[in-house]
Amino acid sequence: MRTTFTLLRDGRRAVRQGPAALADRQRERLATMVDFARARSPYYRELYRSLPERVEHPALLPVTRKEDLMARFDDWVTDPEATLEGVRDFIADPARVGEPFLGKYLVSTTSGTTGHRGVFLLDDQAAAVVRALSLRAARRTLTPSLAARMLVHGMRSAHIVATSGHLAANAVIARSRASGRLHARGSRVLSVHSPLPELVDQLNKYRPVLLGGYAAVIALLAGEQLAGRLRIAPAVVSLVAEGLSDREHRRVSSAFGAHVVNTYACNESLALGYGCRFGWLHTHSDWLILEPVDADHRPVPPGQESFTVLLTTLGRWAQPILRYDLGDSVLWRPDPCPCGDPLPAVRVRGRAADLLSFPRRDGGTARIVPMAFETLLESLPDIDRFQIVQTTSTTLRVRIRPAAGADQDRLWSAVRTGLTALLTDHGTDRVRIERAHEPPEQSPGGKYRVVIPCP
């Protein structure tokens, strides 16, 4: 197995050598991954039975989707010991977050933008690739003085993430802590479900040198910092790329007086890309392939927004992700980025995080990020697909497609109880929660939005 250091050294060399070297690695790794998937995954063996012996271009591969892969989970994975029944039993216990499944896999779950729950396994070699890419990104986005300041303060960091169950950020941080890694020793995890005043109080007490989290939450905290209620001085603010406007991005930087770093990641690829000072995200093209496509999965030219993007990861062996419909709308930069980074540059258009606003009982306004609702419902069993629509400032309409055999009345009771508790925690108890009879609906373009704020 290649070590993180070896992978990091190779990654730096590839960037120095330029686009041709990056493309060579991409072609070779794609051919190797397709061979491996055909040999070890019954699902891919069947799917690729008519393909050429050697595949060096992703366009030769059929498109895959999360719901199709999850339906064939036991055939999809390359380890016959890793079964869906076994991993479901494992994730049913929240106390095991970050613990290795079968002694060798990090497990993370998500519903993503489609409303379908996914279960993902990260093998040790894939984890080494993620660490190497993350270190390369840090080297290209942080100055030596910033890195030194973070080390002087013991890498004290606060991460505002979804903390319910085995969701990716929560699982990764828990695993890092258990492994005793330096960057995790001083880390604190705060829940995205927490009311804003509670987050402010915790951050004022902890005073992190690195503040990370969903961009929409950090934008809310920037408002608290400008108002004087939040009083912290982080050296670095790390945002998950959710589509903050340039104006909001500048506001966050000004509020904290910090170096702001954008990151692009998902469960399927924990290190997709990192931001540069010109507002572009540079993707790790030596270890992944992104294909911007239209609704019929035809290529979209650089400079034009895509309907979705197909992801191929070249360093994930337990659960190969090959030409996978990620659901993000991206814009590929058609010319070299002025920052000088040779890695491809994109902007993500499909992760705009609209806040939901509700009247508080004290006369103020409660603002809640969609992620709080998404993670709440995805933690409930027996939901195949869901959609929450804010029809008015005081009404939520919940569309649910239950799993086969689910007790629908019991499921609805759990949904209503959970949503009521979430709203009450945020100081609003005047919201009507409606049980919709219609199923979750697609947009005219064919996509599902899990949470739809009031227009």
Image (tube, helix red, strand yellow):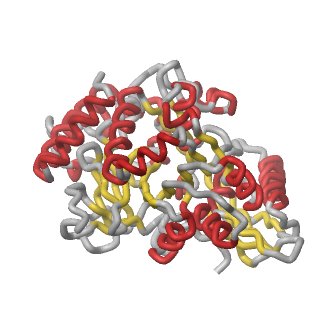
Q: Which residue is drawn at 27% across and 33% down?
A: 7
Q: Which residue is drawn at 73% across and 44% down?
A: 406
Q: How many labels does the image show?
A: 0
Along the viewing direction, whichever of 63 and 231 lies nearer the viewer: 231
**Res 334 → quadrant:** bottom left
Residue farthest bottom in this picture: 455
Quarter of the image with the C terminus is bottom right
Q: In this view, does 433 lie above or below 59?
A: below
**Rendering quarter of residue 10:** top left
Is residue 362 found left or right of 316 in the rendered image?
A: right
Residue 383 can be seen in this image: no
Task: Tell me residue 135's x, y (percent).
Answer: 36, 41
Residue 359 lies, in percent from the top left, at 81, 75
Q: Nearer the viewer, residue 275 or 420?
A: 275
Is 41 displayed left or right of 438 in the figure? left
Which residue is at the front of the view, 181 or 117? 181
Front in this rendered view, residue 65 or 292: 292
Residue 5 is drawn in which quadrant? top left
Left or right of residue 327, residue 336 in this image: left
Quadrant containing the N terminus in the rendered view: top left
176 relative to 44 in the view: left or right: right
Task: Provide residue 396's location: percent of width, then percent of height.
Answer: 75, 69
The residue positioned 58% from the left and 55% from the top of the image is 115
- One can see residue 4 in this view: yes
Residue shown at 23% from the left, 68% from the top:
338
Position in image of residue 377 (x %, y %): 69, 51
